[in-house]
Image (cartoon, rainbow, N blue to C red):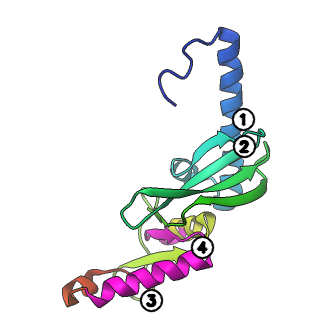
Amino acid sequence: MPSTWDHGLSSREKGARRQRIEEERDAVIAYLRSRLGNEHLLHWLRQVRITRSHDGHILMLTPMLDGHGRICGVQRTDLTPDGEKLERKMLGRHGVMPVQPPVGVLPVSILDLPKAALIGEGFETVAAAVQSCGHHGIVCYNAGGLRNWADQQAKSASTATPDRKAKAPAAV
């Protein structure tokens, strides 16, 4: 939250604003807890942004990045105050979101591969796999995004040196 969030507000208005922020945060925590458990909840909470829509729904936003790492769109998940998902929308150009494992989660061996990247459609699905396996992941947001990511990787691999190919993680 910016340091100037409360400038010009009365004590009553500050209290109401804090209460609203707590309600938004608690809804997102309940949603993430129901999908990812308690152990690394703060790690996943830092990956999302929380706000409200114009009609008052609590929103959890995850960024979609283009090939240069710039935000090109967002995935918007509308939540009830209890953390139940109402609907999900994607706004802007579709992209991907890299996901790192929580601190202390060590990578497990997958098919005896030295390095692996876990690729999937949804944020919660990839986050659960990353949390379980300890390898980084790529959220592609939908089947079309998954296909686009695979096509980009194939194009990149066609011009990569043998050394670069050997060092690249296997996509799982």
The numbered mark, 2 or 1, whose residue comes first in the sequence reads 1
Q: In this view, does 48 lie to the left or right of 110?
A: right
Q: Are marks 2 and 1 in contact (CB under 8 Å)?
A: yes
Given residues 88 and 123, the one toward you in this image is: 88
Q: Residue 111 carries which label?
A: 3
Tell me which label, 4 or 1, sits earlier in the chain.
Answer: 1
Query: Closer to the N terminus: mark 3 or mark 4?
Result: 3
Q: Residues within 10 Å of mark 1 (few under 14, many from 20)?
A: some
- Identity, as a three-letter code, of the amino acid under mark 2: Ile
Residue carrying label 1: 23
Q: Which residue sits at x=43%, y=68%?
A: 136
Look at the image and give the residue range highlighted in magenta.
Answer: 132-159
Q: Distance between the residues labelled 3 and 1?
A: 43 Å
Q: Give the answer, above or below, for where 138 lies relative to 29.
A: below
Say whether residue 113 is visible. Answer: no
Q: Position of residue 61 (x, y in %)?
A: 60, 51
Give the Cα separation between the discs numbered 4 and 1: 28 Å
